[in-house]
Image (cartoon, rainbow, N blue to C red):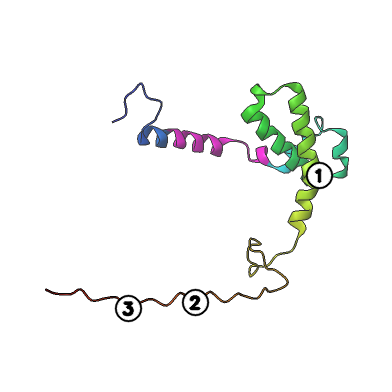
Amino acid sequence: MVKKGDSAISRREFARRAAFVSAAASLAPANLLTSDSIAAPLTAQQPENTSKLSPESQIEVESRIQSIFAQYGSRLTAAQKADIRRLATEAQPPLERLRAFATDNRDGPGLYLKPLMEREKRPSPMPASRKPASTPKSS
C-alpha cells in the first residue's frame, strides 16, 4: 500500500488526472496546434541563418528548441541557449537530406558489415588423437 507521504500516485489518481487532461485538451481551440498559429509567434524569434530552411523546417527547429527550453531552460545560461539554437539550426539540413533518402519496406537495417572481398576460411586444426580410455580393473 502506498502511504500518503510517498511521491507515487495510485492508479485511481492517475486515471482521474488523465481524464482531466483529456477533457482540457478536447476543450482547447481547434486551431491551437495548426502550423499557421505556430509559425506566427516563432518568426519573431528566428535567427538570421534560418532563412535557408523551408518554413516546415523552421517550425521543426523552433519546436525542438522550445521543447529543450521547456525541459532544461531554468538551468541554462543565455550563452547556452544561443548555442542550442545554433546547433538545432545547423542540424536541420543533414536531417532533411537523411529523410529524403528513399527506402522501401523490403530494405533491412544497415547494421551489418558486408565485406566486398570474401576471405578464405582456414581449416580448423584436427584434434590430437585420443588414447582409448582404459577400463577399470576389477579385483
Question: How many marks on residues?
Answer: 3
Element marked by disc 2:
loop
Determine which of the numbered discs, if any, sits on residue 126 in the image: 2
Amino acid type, residue under disc 3 in the picture: Pro
Q: Residue at x 71, y 34 (%)?
A: 65
Asked whether disc 1 touches disc 3, contact meaning CB atoms under 8 Å apart, the reply is no
Amino acid type, residue under disc 1 in the picture: Pro
How many angstroms separate mark 1 from mark 3 (CA)?
81 Å
Determine which of the numbered discs, if any, sits on residue 86 in the image: none
Q: Residue at x 74, y 37 (%)?
A: 62
Image location (x, y in percent) of residue 132: 32, 78
Foreground pick, 57 / 15: 57
Image location (x, y in percent) of residue 58: 79, 41
Mark 1 vs mark 3: in front: 3
Give the residues in magenta.
17-33
Decide which of tag 3 and tag 2 comes sooner along the chain: 2
Give left or right: position of 109 versus 124: right
How many angstroms separate mark 1 from mark 2 (CA)?
68 Å
How many angstroms separate mark 3 from mark 2 (CA)?
17 Å
Q: Label 1: few (<14), some or many (≥20) within 10 Å?
A: some
Residue 85 is covered by the magenta coloring:
no
Mark 1 vs mark 2: in front: 2
Q: Is residue 30 above or below residue 123?
A: above
Decide which of tag 1 and tag 3 comes sooner along the chain: 1
Q: Which residue is mark 3?
A: 132
Q: Residue at x 67, y 33 (%)?
A: 68
Q: Which residue is mark 1?
A: 55
Foreground pick, 20 / 95: 95
Residue 28 is covered by the magenta coloring:
yes
